[in-house]
Image: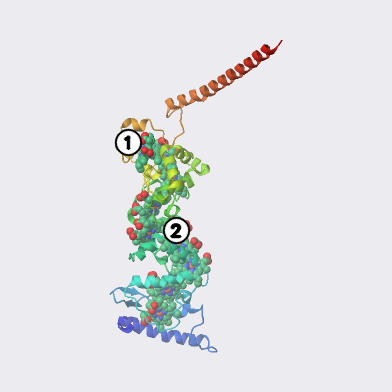
Amino acid sequence: MSKTRLLRATGLVLAGGMALLSALALAALSTSRVQADPPAQQTEAYCLSCHSNPDLSLTLPSGENLSLHISPDMLSTSVHSPAGIECEACHTAIKTYPHPTINFQNKRELSRSYYQACQKCHPANYEKTQDSMHAAAAQAGNQAAPICTDCHGAHDVKPPAQPRSLISSTCGKCHDQIYQQYKNSLHGGALIQENNPDVPVCTDCHGVHNIQDPRTALFRVNSPDLCAGCHANQDLMSKYGLDSDVYNLYNLSWHGVDISVYKAKWPTTWHNSAVCTDCHGVHDILKADDPASTVNPVNLLATCQKCHPGAGPNWTGAWVGHNRIDQNRTPFLYYTEAFYASFIPFVLWLSIIYVGLQIIRATVDRVRRNLP
Ligand code: HEC
Ligand code: HEC
Ligand code: HEC
Ligand code: HEC
Ligand code: HEC
Ligand code: HEC
Ligand code: HEC
Ligand code: HEC
Ligand code: HEC
């Protein structure tokens, strides 16, 4: 389809007019050097002479209307502007008007082609994205899978983590259901309502540019370490009055030992022993004393029954989970442990003394027997 037919008539007229104006302006500015091609890195004013027109647009074969308006206000907010990065740094094929012919059927095709420009200056991030779950989804035919510009924009690239909550809302643009759960969770609530820098954003658990499938056996056996990054940090946890031993004690529990054996020997074999998220939830984690929490005493039995269908009420009562044995919470276990803690050394010392006395006795007897 011809380019001119795609153009809106008004766009064409305006564009032509603007081109004339910009040529006149260029000539007026520098009578000494009249150039056909604008000098590299000073292209912005030239390009904007047409593209700052709010009505400039293009109808693609799909019928979609693509606005070609690039507002100077928007450009000025981009991290690239102060760095002197202008149009031609990304639009390397476009130097003047008329532009090279394009064959994009729809907006998405144009985006998926033009974002390749980011690779030039950010090769490391580009490489990472190619190994990600998002790239795999695109390869499998899901055109909605994100590319650089979906998360960062193209002409209005902002620092991506200011404020920190921007990270989670960026992911939330497409993963809305999870974002809603997360927003109502303890972690997400603290981030969004209190701007708390200590709680996890999406990328703390999933990574940023190299996001992998979180539903594999490998991700599962490693998931307690994700939580441990914060929950085993004593300084961080003491700020919230939380126990930083949960991870160590979990690792000593039946479930924890089970999972660490799989992690060491068969990390890619699915194993159902409980990891942190089986009991606490994933994106919907709540305080343990919240009545809606999956680990609140009201709901705990049902949580265990997901995997232990035969479990009865005594099951949770006798379970110490990832707690230190404690005088108030588990007095019976506490005193039993205290008893054994003193009784076992006592018995040991008693036997050592007994054996010692036996040896002395035997030696004395032998010496006596050998005396003339
Ligand atoms: C004379 C006015 C004019 C100037 C100057 C101009 N453009 Fe365009 N631009 C247009 C028009 C009109 C279109 C619509 C499609 C077409 O006619 O090629 C367009 C389309 C585009 C497109 C989208 C479609 C495509 O061809 O890729 C991009 C990107 C673009 N221009 C970038 C630039 C850049 C970068 C510069 C500066 C180097 C620039 N333009 C200078 C008028 C202009
Ligand atoms: C940092 C790289 C970068 C710079 C700098 C840049 N562009 Fe773009 N531009 C892109 C990308 C990527 C796209 C595809 C946009 C998308 O996916 O929506 C694009 C798209 C466009 C389009 C098509 C309409 C649209 O918004 O999708 C026009 C027109 C355009 N750019 C003009 C310009 C002009 C004029 C300048 C300079 C004032 C400029 N660009 C500077 C990367 C850049
Ligand atoms: C010509 C080289 C160049 C191109 C092309 C380019 N960038 Fe950049 N980008 C930079 C430079 C240089 C900086 C650092 C700017 C600064 O910190 O002042 C930067 C900064 C950034 C940042 C902010 C980093 C931070 O820590 O705040 C993001 C995000 C970003 N670029 C994304 C993109 C995307 C997306 C594209 C493609 C649409 C792109 N860049 C294309 C050179 C480039
Ligand atoms: C799924 C969304 C997403 C995609 C796709 C994405 N980014 Fe990012 N990017 C982010 C987020 C979120 C951050 C901030 C991470 C942080 O600070 O923890 C970030 C950080 C950055 C940074 C600054 C930190 C650094 O690593 O240097 C640059 C530069 C950047 N991205 C460039 C790119 C480029 C280039 C692409 C495409 C090849 C891309 N990003 C694709 C979400 C994305
Ligand atoms: C532009 C939309 C978009 C954005 C933004 C986006 N994603 Fe995705 N994400 C997708 C699509 C599409 C898939 C593939 C879904 C599929 O194939 O089932 C996907 C897949 C995933 C998966 C793999 C699990 C699955 O359902 O396949 C994870 C994990 C993920 N995204 C996390 C994130 C994180 C973290 C961010 C923010 C840094 C983010 N996404 C931003 C669209 C997006
Ligand atoms: C505390 C760590 C953590 C945080 C924070 C987190 N996730 Fe997840 N996410 C996980 C784990 C673990 C899984 C695997 C759950 C499972 O086994 O189904 C997962 C699964 C997923 C999946 C794929 C499975 C599904 O349910 O569709 C997507 C997509 C996803 N997360 C996106 C996000 C987004 C978006 C955010 C931010 C709003 C986020 N995650 C925040 C740990 C986290
Ligand atoms: C980036 C650090 C970080 C990561 C990673 C993290 N958390 Fe948290 N978590 C916190 C902080 C900080 C709090 C306290 C928030 C508050 O009270 O405002 C918290 C609170 C909690 C609570 C509530 C405790 C209570 O009863 O008050 C639970 C349960 C929890 N996290 C479980 C998890 C699990 C499970 C994971 C792994 C899937 C995880 N967290 C990953 C930082 C983190
Ligand atoms: C088999 C279920 C189960 C598993 C697995 C589990 N928890 Fe818990 N967790 C609980 C229960 C029940 C409570 C609340 C009652 C209690 O303190 O024992 C709790 C309480 C907590 C608390 C609040 C503790 C406090 O100081 O008030 C945190 C934080 C926590 N868990 C994090 C984790 C982390 C991190 C993991 C993985 C390393 C994990 N949990 C694994 C069931 C579990
Ligand atoms: C995600 C599934 C899952 C959840 C949730 C779960 N467990 Fe387990 N649990 C297992 C598996 C698997 C084993 C290992 C069984 C084996 O090795 O024979 C196990 C073993 C145990 C054992 C020791 C062995 C036995 O069968 O007596 C106890 C005690 C136990 N779990 C208690 C609990 C309690 C209490 C809860 C709830 C707070 C709970 N579990 C939640 C999967 C789970």
Q: Is residue 346 above or below residue 159?
A: above
- Residue located 45% across and 48% down the image: 226
Give the labeled residue for mark 2. 208
Q: Dot 1 surroundings within 10 Å: few (below 14), some, or many (20 or more)?
A: many
Residue 202 picture quarter: bottom left
Report whether the residue tagged 2 is closer than 8 Å to ligand 4: yes
Residue at the image point whose x is 39% and y is 55% from the top: 213
Type of residue at label 1? Leu
The image quarter in which residue 101 lies = bottom left
Q: In the image, is 213 to the left or to the right of 44? A: left
Q: Secondary structure at mark 1?
A: helix
Q: Is residue 296 left or right of residue 41?
A: left
Amino acid at dot 2: Val
Residue 77: x, y in percent? Answer: 46, 67
Give the farthest residue toward the top: 372
Q: Residue furthest left?
A: 63
Residue designated by label 1:
301
Disc number placed over residue 165 in the picture, else none:
none
Seen from the viewer's position, the closer of residues 73 and 273 is 273
Query: Which comes before the other along the chain, label 2 or label 1?
Result: 2
Indicate whether 303 appears above or below 169. above
Q: Residue furthest right?
A: 372
Quadrant of the frame with the N terminus: bottom left
Q: Residues within 10 Å of mark 2 (few under 14, many from 20)?
A: some
Q: Considering depth in this image, is 149 or 213 the residue closer to the camera?
A: 213
Q: Position of residue 7 (x, y in %)?
A: 32, 81
Cα gap from disc 2 to disc 1, whole angstroms: 36 Å
- From the Cβ of disc 1, is ligand 9 less than 8 Å away? yes
Image: 5 above or below 308 = below
Determine if residue 242 is in view.
Answer: no
Residue 155 appears at what percent x and percent y? 43, 70
